[in-house]
């Protein structure tokens, strides 16, 4: 499947994230020096190497201790790999399956039969798009009820064919429009959550960017739930939380911190099962490296799930979600 992804090198200037401006300035200077070296016969290799070391040190220092809101901005980066990038790069073959058999085919949800080497599985993912035109066509990854019904049909197909299920989560939330609500948005998500508790097939879910609210959970009830290092997973967006609690958009960073939405926070709370490391500076700086790591993770996780019988998968999956938040066998006092 075609993708608009372009090759990204670490020294190309980036745009969009305020906290990266000092790093971007170093990248611009480095690009100027490299261009000068190509145009002239000046030997400035030592200056270039020194600037490269300075650039790497700045990246390491900043990304070692990102705060919650900065992590959200990385998860939303325009050049971060999206579902179609993973499909075109990781898979040897992909046959897209469309429609929910009730209303329409939702462009915000992509599903199909996937082949990765000798491994076959059903892939379901939020589709965001890269260009403005693509994002509008996909509602920026916000699925309608028909998207969740399509996803559930493909999950049941996977169960029938005895294939594992892999879901890639990347949505700010389910589509909030009147039409979506009229067609049963809440019910569609609830039906998915209920059905995924009983699917007799291995399920692996990976948050590759944004994991917003029930829109993410609608394809996120899995035996193994993983997050990429600079993704986020939350019951509500930081902007929505700030608007409700403080009615002040300037409190969005405070809301992000309070929501405990980073991969590190959620792993410590026991709400996810693992974190997939990203290249230095985030997946948008070296997308192919990031996608290769996700591919290796999928193969490793599916191999581990192969050893578990369907009854065991269902039993442990239900126990996993029913006991989330327990401390010493009981829920903590708030």
Image (cartoon, helix red, strand yellow):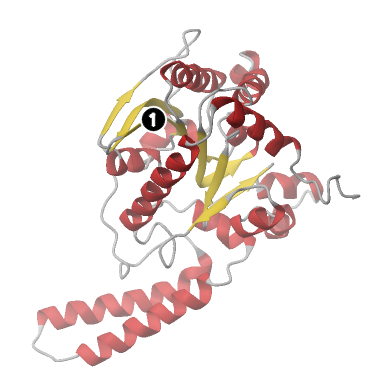
Point out residue 269 in the picture as x, y percentages from the top left corner: 71, 54
Q: Is residue 160 above or below residue 301?
A: above
Query: Which image quarter holds the N terminus?
Result: top left
Relative depth, front residue between 176 and 1: 1
Q: Residue at x 67, y 18 (%)?
A: 187
Q: Is residue 315 left or right of residue 125?
A: right
- Whether residue 153 can be seen here: yes
Most distant residue in the left direction: 41
Q: Is residue 117 above or below residue 24?
A: above
Point out residue 27 in the picture as x, y percentages from the top left corner: 34, 74
User: In the figure, residue 116 lies in which quadrant?
Assistant: top left
Most distant residue in the top direction: 102
Q: Is residue 69 above or below residue 201?
A: below
Point out residue 159 in the picture as x, y percentages from the top left corner: 48, 20
State the SS at label 1.
Answer: strand
Residue hosting label 1: 121
Relative depth, front residue between 296 and 184: 296
Q: Residue at x 37, y 61 (%)?
A: 285
Question: How many residues crowd mark 1 within 10 Å: few (<14), some (14–19), many (20+)?
Answer: many
Q: Residue at x 74, y 43 (%)?
A: 324
Point out residue 94 in the picture as x, y percentages from the top left corner: 29, 29
- Whether residue 140 can be seen here: no
């Amino acid at each position: 499947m075609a993708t608009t992804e372009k090759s990204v090198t670490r020294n190309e200037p980036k745009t969009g994230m305020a906290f990266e401006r000092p790093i971007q300035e170093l990248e611009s200077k480095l690009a100027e020096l490299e261009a000068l070296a190509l145009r002239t016969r000046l030997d400035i290799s030592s200056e270039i190497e020194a600037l490269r070391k300075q650039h790497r040190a700045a990246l390491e220092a900043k990304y070692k201790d990102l705060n919650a809101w900065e992590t959200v901005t990385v998860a939303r980066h325009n050049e971060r790999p999206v579902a179609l990038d993973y499909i075109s790069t990781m898979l040897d073959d992909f046959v897209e399956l469309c429609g929910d058999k009730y209303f329409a085919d939702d462009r915000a949800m992509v599903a199909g039969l996937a082949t990765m080497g000798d491994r076959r599985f059903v892939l379901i993912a939020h589709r965001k798009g890269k260009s403005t035109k693509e994002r509008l066509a996909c509602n920026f990854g916000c699925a309608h009820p028909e998207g969740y019904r399509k996803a559930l049909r493909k999950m049941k197909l996977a169960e029938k064919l005895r294939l594992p299920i892999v879901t890639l989560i990347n949505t700010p939330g389910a589509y909030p429009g009147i039409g979506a609500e009229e067609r049963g948005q809440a019910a569609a998500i609830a039906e998915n959550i209920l059905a995924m508790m009983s699917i007799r097939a291995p399920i692996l879910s990976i948050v590759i960017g944004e994991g917003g609210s029930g829109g993410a959970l609608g394809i996120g009830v899995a035996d193994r739930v993983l997050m990429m290092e600079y993704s986020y997973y939350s019951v509500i967006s930081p902007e929505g939380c700030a608007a409700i609690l403080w009615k002040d958009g300037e409190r969005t960073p405070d809301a992000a911190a309070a929501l405990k939405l980073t991969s590190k926070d959620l792993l410590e709370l026991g709400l996810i099962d693992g974190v997939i490391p990203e290249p230095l500076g985030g997946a948008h700086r070296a997308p192919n490296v990031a996608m290769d790591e996700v591919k290796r993770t999928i193969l490793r996780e599916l191999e581990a799930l192969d050893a578990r019988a369907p009854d065991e998968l269902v039993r442990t999956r239900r126990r996993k979600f029913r006991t989330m938040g327990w401390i010493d066998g009981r829920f903590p006092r708030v």
